[in-house]
Image (cartoon, rainbow, N blue to C red):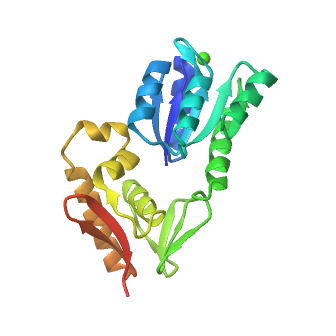
Amino acid sequence: MKLLIIEDETELRRMMAEALRDAGYVVETVKTYADADEKLHLYEYDCILLDLMLPDGNGLDLLKMLSARGSASRVIITSAKDSVEDKVEGLDLGADDYLPKPFHLAELVARVRSLIRRSGVGTHSIQVGNVSLNPDDRSAAVEGKTLNLLHKEYHILYYFMTRPGRVVDKQVLAEAVWGDNADQSDNFSFLYQQVANLKRKLKEAKASIAIQAVYGFGYKLVEEA
Ligand code: CA
């Protein structure tokens, strides 16, 4: 789960990022309209926290751009302008939720969690073959027996289990698990290492699913007969 926080207030941006990272999300942040616009053209996010009043633009214009592109990203507007007009316009433009400032960080985390749950890829347990994942406590099990995974291994497995049978580009996987800066290195050794560890753990636990390499492109999750 990768999130983008668009917020120009430094201290608030830092606290939001910390709270959401603690909750287990991969978090990217930007402080201007221009930076947000650039990120949104380059990367995909599961959820976007959108401040409306930015020093160089109005967040509603970013929302218009996302909606015109048919983006699948979920959007929560966070705004100090608690005006009914902004709220209505934001929701009309496709925002999923509206959180007026000031808000408690616990409320922010709860709203993000609830939104991701509603979008169907959230906290219900996910089952593929004999492997189950529980996003609530970030645990994995094979036929009910706990699989001991490191944090990044869990995120990789989650990514595959929400996309069974689909070919996953290694670049996109790296960005989803390590954040946007994963693309600043063309060295994927960290990714190969974690995927190799995960494959070994699945095999040792006699999982009926496996991560297969797709030559020159990435991987896919397959169910073994
Ligand atoms: Ca602002």
Q: Nearer the viewer, residue 151 or 92?
A: 92
Q: Quadrant of residue 160?
A: bottom left
> Which residue is at 24% across, 58% downward?
217
* Residue furthest to the bottom: 225
**Where residue 91 sits in the image (x, y, percent)?**
72, 35
* Residue furthest to the right: 84
> Which residue is at 32% across, 78% downward?
203
Q: Nearer the viewer, residue 197 or 223?
A: 223
The answer to whether residue 32 is above or below residue 179 is: above
* Residue furthest to the front: 68
In the rendered structure, the answer to whether residue 84 lies left or right of residue 5 reads right
> Which residue is at 61% across, 50% downward?
116
In the rendered structure, the answer to whether residue 213 lies left or right of residue 14 reads left
**Where residue 161 sits in the image (x, y, percent)?**
46, 66
**Where residue 218 sits in the image (x, y, percent)?**
27, 59
- Whether residue 32 appears in this view of the structure is no
User: On the rendering, which quadrant does ligand 1 occupy?
Assistant: top right
> Which residue is at 54% across, 43% downward?
70
The answer to whether residue 206 is above or below residue 37 is: below
Q: Quadrant of residue 84?
A: top right
Q: Nearer the viewer, residue 87 or 49?
A: 87
The answer to whether residue 136 is above or below residue 17 is: below
**Where residue 153 sits in the image (x, y, percent)?**
37, 59
Quadrant in which the C terminus is drawn: bottom left
- Whether residue 43 appears in this view of the structure is yes
Count of labels shown?
Answer: 0
